[in-house]
Image (cartoon, rainbow, N blue to C red):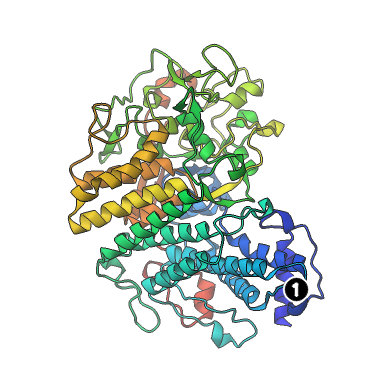
Amino acid sequence: MKLKYIIISVLALAGISGCDSYLDKQPDDQLTIETVFENRTNMERWLAYIYTGIPKYYSYDGPDAIADELAPSVGWESQGFKAILYQNGNWTPSQPGVITYWQTLPKLIRQAYIFIQNAHPLEDVSETEVNYMKAECRFMIAYYHSLLVMNYGSVPMIKDAAVGTNAADMMLKQEKFYEVVDWIAEELEETAEQLPNFYDDASKYGRATALWCYAIRARLLTFAASPLVNGNPAMQNVKNIDGVNIFSSEFDPERWRVAADANKTLIVKAEEAGHALYIERTDGDIDPFQSYQNAVMLRYNQGNTEVIIPRTYDDAGYFDRQANPRSMGGAGAIGITQNLVDAFFMKNGLVPITGYNADGSPIINSDSGYSETGYSTANEVAKTTWIYADKSTTTESKSEVNHVIVPSETFNMYCNREPRFYISVLYNEQYHYGKRQHGSQNWYTNFFSGGEDGGPSHDSPSAGYLIRKRVDPSAIPSDSKGTYIKRQGIVYRLAEAYLSYSECLLEYAIAKGTYNQAQNEVVQYVNKIRERAGIPVYGSDSQEIPVPADPLVMRDLVHRERRVELNCEYGNRWYDLRRWNEAEKVLNGNFYGMNTLADKDHRNDFYKRTRYQTRKFISYWWPIPQDDIDKNVNLVQLPEWN
């Protein structure tokens, strides 16, 4: 009877969420395990349900919101918004999580095992297709284990369905971190051999492929080579019920080599299959504005072959509404931090801010040309067909190739920045295409106190900025209009592989003392990203930025490149800060933005760094839910959460 209820639950949920096309069927409450797998539709619905655990891309209360990039309205704390509670350190293992993988993923893992055990060829389902489906399930089992181990660190391995057996069979204990990681990596490598690189059938877009396996394997092994878990003495007190150490306290440089090999394998396989960084050109030259925007906005069938793992069903429209200014019917509530604003390079490719003083004031790189005083005196024009920065210099046509990126009288903090900055950041008094199309009298954002886009408001941008990246730049929420309304989420794109490969190569070279020999290849893959971004690359020519002789300086630049390129995407920053063992330093203390209490009559006062929040960091790992600790005597809570 228990299994019957599981079947009904699976098929009912599959009817409302999952992978696009086969989710509109109604369940039959008389189904048995045998009848499910005698019917193609039910078989596909079961498989679709297993995919529902893939985390959403357009989320603002998940990992993105608890790093140092997204800034959801701090006023939401009064409504119990989980991410703000967590940011402020108001969290216990008894609370429902920002991250709920412990509660949701084991169930899906067991459903995948049931599928593997019971699916078989039918008259209208060939043996080849069934084998692909089973391999997809095997991928999902490994992928979900990777999410568990990267977020909780100390986890059991689920190696069968364990349905219909006694309770003792469910009382799994936590295994050694590297035993779990190595098992997942092996599963993914073997599963890749059972799946195609892509499906000829367009309806299968969004289904697991061999490249999905290589991508998740590369991401996991990069995490597993990093300082948080690779020889971190702070982890030596984490033990399982048997008193066995979960983490190794000895640094193993070979973990970086293995991770580098995994990322290189992914790159080679992906490029052989036709994947490449997404690039648009204007008059024959790379158009960095269009290229970077559409790398995260367009689907594979729209020419964006940078996408390796898409999430075909997501909440893009709702995200747009939360991130757009209030004067257009948006909530004006999903901002970004000053930390992220500071991270972007200048147009000349140099770092503007190298650190912070004790009072939060920036340490400015005098060679960069960056300034936090005064306003620009001339328009900044770029050769691009991107029409969303400001009105074109001559016409309103998309064919016009010269557009004003930054108009005169813009605060100098936002001038002469790299193209990715303008795609990612919506700052005060910035031209907004949607506001203009909406018929607003003011075409520029007005985040001043009392302004149509500012406070006082429960949802006004807490830090004085809104996120622009991933948001439809033409969206008008009040009119339900936009150019990119139906779009996917992106779990993994090729740029991540390039950056991870550079990092792993560099770290292995640092460990082995071979930086001089590895330098060229490290720089090569970083430069691929910078070239697409429209900023100078590293090299020895007069127009290039000299490659640092110090590998630790190069490490900082690789980390920054990763932060900028992957900003506000799929929790990458949350995982990076943790695996670099930097989260406690970065996520603990004062967070700054602009002074949103200043009105337009006091314009200069708005553009002053102002603390808007003080955060309290708790732990590098997510807590095991207290309910599970209470139910399973074989589980041990992580030390920080006891």
How far across and down, in percent of the image, does residue 135 sit? 58, 68
Residue 639 sits in quarter: bottom left
x%, y% of residue 476? 65, 31
The number of numbered discs placed on residues in the rendered structure image is: 1
Tell me: residue 347, above or below residue 344. above
Q: Is residue 582 above or below residue 431?
A: below
Q: Is residue 341 visible?
A: yes
Q: Closest to the observer: 280 or 103?
A: 280
Residue 455, percent from left and from top? 54, 31
The residue that appears at 54% across and 56% down in the rendered structure is 197
> Where's residue 369, x and y in %?
29, 24
Q: Quadrant of the N terminus?
A: bottom right
Quick check: can you spot residue 426?
no
Q: Is residue 250 above or below residue 383?
A: below
Q: Which residue does the numbered mark 1 point to in the structure image?
A: 36
Q: Nearer the viewer, residue 62 or 535?
A: 535
SS class, disc 1: helix
Q: Residues within 10 Å of mark 1 (few under 14, many from 20)?
A: many
Instruction: Please indicate whether residue 617 sits to the left or right of residue 248 in the image.
Output: right
Q: From the viewer's perspective, tell me whether residue 544 is left or right of residue 615.
A: left
Q: Residue at x 25, y 66 (%)?
A: 251
Q: Nearer the viewer, residue 486 or 123?
A: 123
> At 26% across and 70% down in the image, what residue appears?
249
Q: Amino acid at mark 1?
A: Val
Q: Along the line of sight, which residue is nearer the eye, 535 or 198?
A: 198
Quadrant in which the C terminus appears: bottom left
